[in-house]
Image (tube, rainbow, N blue to C red):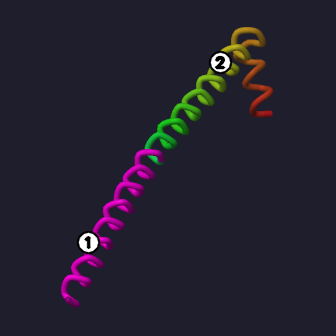
Amino acid sequence: MPTVECNLKIQRLEIVQDQHAEKIGFLFKKQDATDKALNDIRDIKYILIGGFGFYMLDKVGLVETAIKLFG
């Protein structure tokens, strides 16, 4: 009878291991989604910086902008 009990314990451990593997897979998918969102935020940041730069060059002028930036 001890082998039956051992087999049941092994089966329970395998089930728990499968559940943990599923949870880990879910967390990796969630991390990938978070990384994608952060990349989108970085893209938006650079678009805003470029838009501000274009505004400065358009409204203030190239020479005046260079003077304000460099000194």
Distance from disc 2 to disc 1, alpha carbons, whole Å, reads: 61 Å
Q: Quadrant of the C terminus?
A: top right
Secondary structure type for disc 1: helix
Classify residue 70 by image quadrant: top right
Using the image, tell me which numbered label, if any, was put on residue 11: 1
Q: Which residue is mark 2?
A: 51
Q: Are marks 2 and 1 in contact (CB under 8 Å)?
A: no
Residue 37 x, y percent position in the rendering: 53, 36
Query: Is residue 25 in the magenta section?
Result: yes
Disc 2 residue type? Gly
How would you classify the magenta stretch by its main secondary structure? helix
Disc 1 residue type? Gln
Q: Quadrant of the N terminus?
A: bottom left
Using the image, tell me which numbered label, if any, was put on residue 2: none
Instruction: Identify the magenta region.
Output: 1-30
Badge 1 local density, few (<14 within 10 Å), some, or many (20+)?
A: few
**Is residue 60 shown above or below 1?**
above
Most distant residue in the top direction = 59
Most distant residue in the front direction = 1
Residue 56 x, y percent position in the rendering: 73, 17
Residue 35 located left or right of residue 67: left
**Which residue does the image show at 78% across and 18% down from the upper left?**
64
Residue 24 x, y percent position in the rendering: 40, 57
Residue 69 located left or right of residue 54: right
**Which residue does the image show at 75% across and 21% down from the upper left?**
65
Mark closer to the chain start, 2 or 1: 1
Residue 55 x, y percent position in the rendering: 71, 14
**Which residue does the image show at 28% across and 69% down from the upper left?**
14
Residue 16 or 54: which is nearer the viewer? Answer: 16
Badge 2 local density, few (<14 within 10 Å), some, or many (20+)?
A: few
Residue 35 or 17: which is nearer the viewer? Answer: 17
